[in-house]
Amino acid sequence: MAIMLAGTSMTAQGYAPAATDAAADEWAAKTEAQMTDDERFSILHGIMPILIGPYANPELKTKWPDDLVPGAGYIMGVPRLGVPSLRETDASLGVTNPFGIRKGDTATALPAGLAIGASFNPELAFAGARAVASEARAKGFNVLLGGGINLVRDPRNGRNFEYISEDPLLSGIMGAEAVKGAQSVGVVSTVKHFSLNSNETNRHTWNAEIDEAAHRESDLLAFQIAIERGQPGSVMCAYNIVNGAPACGNDHLLNNVLKKDWRYKGWVMSDWGAVSSADFAVKGLDQQSGQQLDKQVWFDAPLKAKLADGSLPRERLSDMVKRILRSMKANGLVDAGAAPAVDMKKHAEIAREIARQGIVLLKNNAGALPLAANVGSVAVIGRNAHVGVLSGGGSSQGLPPSGWAASIPIGGGEGSMASWRVERWFAGAPQAALKAALPKAEVRFDPGLYPQDAAALAARSDVAIVFVSKYEAEGFDSPDLSLPGNQDAIVEAAVAANPNTIVVLQTGNPVAMPWRDKVKAIVAAWYPGQEGAAAIADVLTGKVNPSGRLPISFPATMETQPRPTIPSYGTPDRTEVTVRMNEGSDVGYRWNASNGIKALYPFGHGLSYTRFAASGLKVDGSTASLTVRNTGDRAGATVVQLYLMGRGAETKQRLVAFQRIELASGTERKVDLNIDPRLLADWSGKGWTIPAGEYRFALGENAETVGPPIRVKMKQRTWRD
Ligand code: BGC
């Protein structure tokens, strides 16, 4: 990779080293002991400091604190004790600027989380988050509301584009690196949304029912891995309900699992508008965020009353405060100096690199790609391919330095997110990028309005590239996997007129693609971020050899999936619904394996312009090794995927290790992998158990195309978290 991703010395860039755990605990205890109760309560809740839009809080205008930075959240500090205010910004895909509140303020806009997941490259997750966090710091923020790692349980969920994958190991490892990258510049990062925020439909009243073991082996495992490796200063609890108790007032999830079993030392902040009682404090919530979105400032007067009547023990109050303070100290917020300047050019390169490594080549017949350097004429077809690339909507929506090329209010729908539902296209057009990459070719454009026009242009071009897209946004699911409008008809028309048709998807989810057998090649670009157009051109023209792998399964039909339709879809917002997660821990490819279902494109799938061969696989149950060789004629990267395929007679598929490796043509490398034992184990009240027996492991090109199994006899083993 051409750019330097990690490894640059933090201090050399001006970021002070954070305090040790012991120093953080000590400072938190000492400082908390000196606080008055009013000071203690003051840091347990805060506002969403936005003066325009639906969350306007004009009453604050008169007492707007000096150190406030308008954004997602603000919690005033205690200056006399050196406790800084918390200045929070959204973050997963770039520093956001909700409703343009910071006039003209732009930030690097990264590709979708799914693109980061598709790279299978933890270094890139680190680099992306570090870039975002350093911009956040330079703007005055010190908390990054990043680390969205909910597992993709439903391919229609409107927020999947913000998340990483359907797999706990991949999401956990990438989530951890994102946290580490952010916290390396002296800010706190969250992981969110804890837990099972798998759909946007009725997200405040959606009661996800799941067995404890299934939860521990899936979504909770992703959080556990991200937390133990990444040490986020804060965990954001979710809007939804889990087994009857709101996630932000869920004694079991917050107190038993997170704080007792996992010994988590940071603080739990609520999602914005997720608190409905002061009781949540006793159930494990430490801080109420965006308080004007809740019916009451529960963590002030009502919580004070609880302290007075004894239902909030004093030790718990101290614990809440100390958790916040220790994360501040541990991550350098207390001793923060001036923020170093940021290198926006380097950040743009990181955005481009994530897009490049996240793009997945789904299909490539007869070497349709890369485009021949001497191609004479290219038809670029599809809505907005002449202006920009699509981004996802909601609280993660960014405004890049080059701006939005188009901003289309979608409106409609209910709930607080309706006003955020604006379809935005980042400047940087695929048509122009292709033109620049193929200077000798004639690159013409058709907007994809009418099949006849698309067909006419395709017919008189050497190759037709159809850009199809599907806008997704926080607050909304889509009913199915179809592409909206007449986009399928446009592709059909183009390919009927010119068999040399290639489709580029810009989506935040899998899509159905009824024309997939007819077209020559399909490229999944997700929402590719501010440098997306150039990255797409890099891959189409072969400047970059594609290496992305699907972080989510593309289902052939929803009929065979755990929920063929979304429960309560289409009902008025906040309709109560209980949804049994009947797939349990068998999320995505695991479900397909257990039920003998073939995906349209499986998890882990992705093609390259070169070929790789693996040999000498050895697995002993806790480690594995093999040699990978690039047998093709150009440099490229592959992702080694090691799967557990089954135990004894049981089919039980689990990705147990992965590694992305880059190899020059004709070279090879030995790869060593560690297997996390939790992926072989069953969880029960006693902890994790690996039952004695025979375990089958296999290398996979993807979850469905796997090599011969290696059988390993394993002894029984039981351990606690
Ligand atoms: C989202 C969070 C976000 C928060 C603050 C909520 O709507 O669910 O992910 O961090 O808003 O903007």
Image (tube, rainbow, N blue to C red):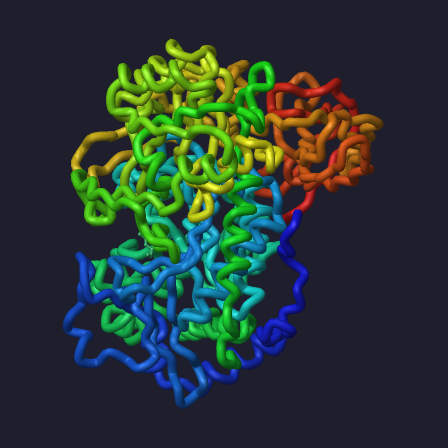
Q: Residue at x 50, y 72 (%)?
A: 341
Residue 298 appearing in the image: no
Q: Depth check: give the residue in front, 531 or 395.
A: 531
Q: Name the residue at the front extreme.
A: 440
Residue 345 locus on image (x, y percent): 51, 59
Q: Is residue 530 above or below residue 589?
A: below
Q: Is residue 162 above or below residue 191?
A: above
How many badges with numbers are in the image? 0
Q: Residue at x 32, y 62 (%)?
A: 72
Q: Residue at x 45, y 11 (%)?
A: 499
Q: Residue at x 64, y 74 (%)?
A: 11
Instruction: Specify whether 20 is left or right of 696.
Output: left
Q: Is residue 404 above or below residue 40?
A: above
Q: Depth check: give the residue in front, 629 or 305.
A: 629
Q: Is residue 707 above or below residue 467?
A: above
Ligand 1's quadrant is bottom left
